[in-house]
Image: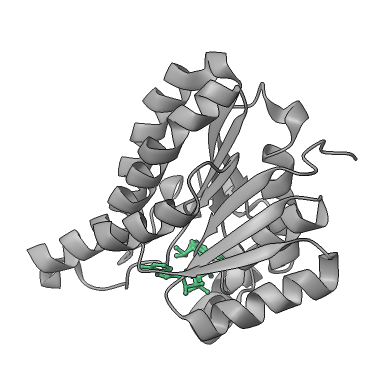
């Protein structure tokens, strides 16, 4: 399927590994020039090299902490007019809700709510002017089915879901779409490290297995395609059917 996005430019956040990397790679494989952002410049260099080798596409890197305003300023100074924005950052830690302090909440909100909201706000007018824009936010299956002790993740991502529900409709006339992609048991390194907890969850997936990062990346690229302009404001699960069993 030709996504008709050859020559477009994508800014992909949290892209040194895992799901962000998979999205960047799938976009690059469709002829998109990608700019990868993460905190660790060495990991980013390795990721960009891998993308160039596998796809032949241009892959640039910016080292920045997207949970800070200074980090976002640094990124947007270099990458001012992306056609495609994939927002992402590491997920907040799990824990007993009684132990969550204001500081925990601020940290989670900075990374998983303010970060995507600000990145959208600061890039979307360019997309509107050019009458093409695709935003994909990597959120979580917990938006559909909250998981005990993942309250920082669930609450901050639901805040973003609410924000997108309004803003996506506000910009839809300009061929600018905003969608959320909800991963569930996609076998990134981070999920593999969760060990028994992840294995137990994967055992309940109707598809009978964990998802691959590549499958998630392909779904992201599809939403960024020129022909996906009529899909907006949606929350798309990539979870092998897991959540539909429980709601
Ligand atoms: P990961 O931890 O492997 O990768 C996160 C990426 O974001 C890395 O490149 C990291 O360097 C970068 N990053 C983290 N914080 C950053 C910051 N402040 N500024 C810039 N870059 C930053 O995670 P993953 O498994 O790829 O998952 C991606 C997101 O999806 C996470 O938020 C995770 O909680 C969520 N999620 C994943 C799954 C799954 O099945 N893998 C399920 C539910 C939710």
Q: Is residue 18 above or below residue 40?
A: above
Name the residue nearer the viewer: 37 or 112: 37
Residue 88 is situated, as x and y percent measured from the top left of the image, at 47, 58
Can you give x and y, in whole percent of width and height, for residue 107 in the image? 22, 65
The vertical placement of 72 against 134, above or below, is below
* Depth check, front residue: 21 or 182: 21
Question: Relative to residue 143, is residue 152 drawn left or right?
Answer: left
**Residue sitting at 76 percent across and 44 percent down?**
7
168 horizontally vs 209: left or right = left
> Residue placed at 41% from the left, 53% from the top?
77
Residue closest to the eye, 143 or 31: 31
Q: Give residue 51's quadrant in the image.
A: bottom right
**Quadrant of the image occupied by residue 162:** top left
Residue 98 image offset from top left, x and y in percent: 12, 68
Of residues 97 and 204, the one nearer the viewer is 97
- Expressed as whole percent of the image width and height from the top left, the position of residue 48 reads 66, 73
The residue drawn where x is 12% and y is 73% is 99
Colouring of the image: one colour
Residue 152 is at least partly visible in this image: no
Q: Is residue 187 left or right of residue 40?
A: right
Q: What quarter of the picture does the N terminus occupy?
A: top right
Query: Where, by quadrant of the figure, is residue 26 drawn?
Result: bottom right
Q: Residue furthest top?
A: 173
Residue at left offset 84%, top offset 65% = 56
């Amino acid at each position: 399927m030709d996504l008709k996005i050859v020559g477009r430019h994508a800014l992909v956040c949290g892209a040194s590994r895992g799901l962000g990397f998979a999205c960047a790679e799938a976009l690059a494989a469709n002829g998109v020039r990608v700019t990868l952002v993460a905190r660790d410049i060495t990991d980013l260099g390795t990721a960009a090299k891998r993308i160039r080798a596998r796809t032949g596409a241009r892959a640039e890197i910016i080292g920045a902490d997207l949970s800070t305003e200074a980090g976002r300023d640094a990124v947007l100074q270099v990458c001012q007019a992306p056609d495609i924005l994939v927002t992402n950052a590491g997920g907040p830690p799990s824990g007993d809700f009684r132990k969550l302090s204001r500081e925990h909440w601020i940290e989670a909100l900075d990374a998983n709510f303010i970060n995507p909201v600000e990145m959208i706000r600061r890039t979307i007018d360019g997309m509107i002017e050019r009458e093409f824009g695709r935003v994909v936010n990597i959120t979580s299956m917990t938006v559909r089915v909250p998981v005990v002790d993942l309250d920082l993740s669930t609450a901050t991502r639901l805040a973003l879901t609410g924000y997108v529900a309004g803003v996506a409709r506000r910009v839809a006339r300009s061929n600018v779409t905003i969608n959320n992609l909800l991963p569930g048991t996609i076998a990134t390194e981070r999920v593999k490290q969760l060990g028994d907890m992840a294995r137990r969850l994967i055992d309940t997936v109707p598809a009978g297995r964990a998802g691959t990062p590549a499958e998630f990346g392909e779904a992201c690229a599809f939403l960024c395609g020129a022909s996906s302009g009529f899909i907006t404001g949606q929350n798309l699960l990539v979870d092998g059917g897991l959540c539909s069993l429980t709601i």
